[in-house]
Amino acid sequence: MRNDTATASAVLALTGGPSNVRHVTHCLTRLRLTVADPAAVDEESLRALPGVLGVMGVGTPSLQVVLGPGVVDTVTAEVERQLAAGARAGGVRAGAGAVEARKGPGASAADPDTAATPDTAAATPTPQKGPLAAALRRIANVFVPLIPALIGCGILAGVNGLLTNAGWLPGLTPALAAIASGFMALIAVFVGYQTAKEFGGTPILGGAVAAVIVCPGVAKVTAFGVHLSPGQGGALGALAAALLATRVEKWCRGRLPGALDVLLTPTVTVLVAGLATLYGLMYAAGAVATAIGTGANWLLTTTGAFAGLILGGLFLPLVMLGLHQALIPIHTTLIEQQGYTVLLPLLAMAGAGQVGGALAVYVRLRHDTTLRTTIRSALPAGLLGVGEPLIYGVSLPLGRPFVTACVGGAAGGGFVGFFAMLGEKVGATAIGPSGWALFPLLTGNHGPAPALAIYAGGLLTAYAVGFAATLAFGFPRGTTSTTPPVTDRTPAGST
């Protein structure tokens, strides 16, 4: 039976003890810890801990322990509880004076992937990352906390569409429509709030400036010779507006005395950033959003099969690097424009290729009971589109199966993309889940039925090709069901 309290205690002990942990957060599958002394982490024992599917960032302050969906939520909560209890009992610092909890699959400006917490910045070096990767990570941190609402509202929108098309419960469907669309109607405000929070501004000021975008009164404003439309620029405009508001706020706070700061800083921030949003950012962001939609449609209509091959084949490496969440603004823009994102079903094929590859490993390496146990425990999450347990626990440590899983994903993506070239688009009304969990969110330009069939065909193709490619090319020559492949089981990128 799973014991999350024991797991949390063991993780804390093997990462140098509570006094070595400065910040705690988590995403969908990973417990993320900022540690003061990376050398105090016992990597080998941590990897051997029951329930731990992988460890990333060893040797840096940004440690990531892969636990899998569901488990990570309860273990993180228990880690936070134990750290808080230790802080109360012995004055141990955890984060900024106490554990800085980040509930849900999100992160903050102090996310260990992006920066050290304020009280540890001088004491611990920031892991070396390219500026582009760091920027993408921070943008992802803005949108990841919004995923639960996107999932919930997306599923309700799908259910409401089915009820409406079938003519069932006509008295309920207007209420479901309002519930499902309310979040998307105000998503700019939430994006603005999260952006200011991530980049060090006052969150409510970021939300206030972004709210200008969805205000009905903007229809009376003329910019570049045309009347603006409420919602023009969407999430991208909100992101830009809140970033500008944060810069203005920081500039004001560094120059105004305390007495004036309370009055003038929020006023100047909202005024300057609000005017810039109305007379520049909304128009520019609207043009970018239109270009994204036009580009995605052209890509699938003209080169659908090839685009599917590339997107489905390269998505697993993005997941491995944690950069896949940087695509969330693009998905969000497409959902705002078209009602669904055509990219997510293509990218979901990568997880299906991973499942096929893992099944081939399970069949081929019958001698390896530990690996087969890992596959059995990680496979349900993989079928639901959470690929990290299989990546870090199975395919990446073995090496070749990771590549052949990408081949399976490419095949599934090519299958879905081919039908897009024929005029049958498959889209998702929300982001977050994939694999089998994406079925309730599927729709397309010809309704949900063709989309469901094409997506199912893509999954089966990715499963089959991932399985066959791994079985044929995923192991060194001479490997049999009784001969283990040569591997140190250390994931690439670990130290």
Image (spheres, rainbow, N blue to C red):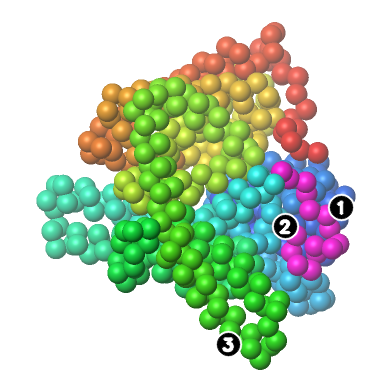
**Looking at numbered disc 1 in the image, what kind of residue is underneath it?**
Ala
Mark 2, residue position: 115
Image depth: mark 2 or mark 3 in front: 3
Span shown in magenta:
116-130
- Provide the secondary structure element on which disc 3 rests: helix
Q: Is residue 150 visible?
A: no
Q: Residues within 10 Å of mark 3 (few under 14, many from 20)?
A: few
Q: Residue at x 69, y 62 (%)?
A: 110
Residue in the foreground of this view, choosing between 312 and 211: 211
**Looking at numbered disc 2 in the image, what kind of residue is underneath it?**
Ala
Q: Are marks 2 and 1 in contact (CB under 8 Å)?
A: no
- Provide the secondary structure element on which disc 1 rests: helix
Q: Residue at x 63, y 50 (%)?
A: 135
Q: Compute the Cα span from label 2 to label 3.
A: 30 Å
Mark 3, residue position: 263
Query: Does residue 442 appear to the left or right of 465 in the view shown?
Result: left
Q: Is residue 282 a member of the stretch shown in magenta?
A: no
Residue in the foreground of this view, choosing between 366 and 133: 133
Q: State which tag comes first along the sequence, 1 or 3.
A: 1
Main SS, magenta region, reads loop
Q: State which tag comes first along the sequence, 2 or 1.
A: 1
190 over 485 or under it: above or below: below
Most distant residue in the bottom direction: 259
Q: Is residue 471 visible?
A: yes
Q: Residues within 10 Å of mark 1 (few under 14, many from 20)?
A: some
Q: Tell me the tag on residue 40.
A: 1
Q: Residue at x 36, y 39 (%)?
A: 294
**Looking at numbered disc 3 in the image, what kind of residue is underneath it?**
Leu
Q: Residue at x 49, y 29 (%)?
A: 312
Most distant residue in the top direction: 478
